[in-house]
Amino acid sequence: MRLVPDHRTPGPSNSSPSTTYKPITGHCYCGAIEWQLVGKVAFTANCHCKTCQCLAGSAYGSTSLMVYDDKGIEFTRGQPKVFHDTADSGNPTQRGFCSTCGTVLFNHVSEGRKDQHWAMRTGSIVGIPAASPMMDKEIFMKSKPAWVPSVQSPGNQYEGMPDD
């Protein structure tokens, strides 16, 4: 199964694929689902939205926003279970899980809208590329529990989803 941006709307990057795009792979905990894409990590964030807290069973979820070529994300082994939802931002989203072990694999936010993007759960990425930004943002700070320390300076904290 290949998941690609809607052909009527650009993906997260309006530029053509560059030579900095590299293969990125990942899998769920039990190995029943494997995925790959050719691209790069645009940013990695701790997301404090209520949904990520629930899905992670913790105070935040770690997510990596992907910029990728027009081939999209391919599931090379197994198929994710997809749950259609509304994100804390109010945008429609798809959330992908392994139906065997329950690993959360991705969010596809703004499904069918111009600003759509794919965010892969950071823990599912195998060998995060060295050039990737490492935990450079905290998002949905408005939902962060008071007892959780901030890991980023205030300039890298966002009440919701950052514009970039």
Image: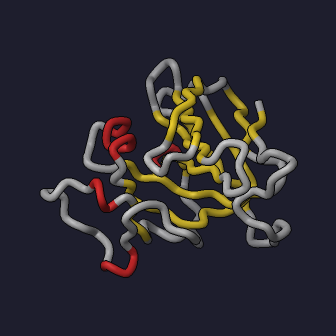
Where is the N terminus found, in terms of image quarters? top right
Look at 52% across and 29% down and name the residue there: 97
Q: Residue 156, image x and y in percent?
A: 39, 75
> Does 95 sit above or below residue 59?
above
Look at 72% across and 43% down and name the residue there: 112
Q: Quadrant of residue 42?
A: bottom right
> Does 91 sit above or below residue 136?
above
Look at 81% across and 70% down and name the residue there: 15
Q: Residue 153, image x and y in percent?
A: 31, 79
Q: Residue 14, image x and y in percent?
A: 79, 67
**Residue toward you, 134 or 70:** 70
Q: Residue 13, image x and y in percent?
A: 74, 65
> Is 79 situated left or right of 65 in this image?
right
Look at 81% across and 53% down and name the residue there: 9
Q: Which residue in the rendered view is the most extreme toward the top?
A: 100
Where is the C terminus found, in terms of image quarters? bottom right
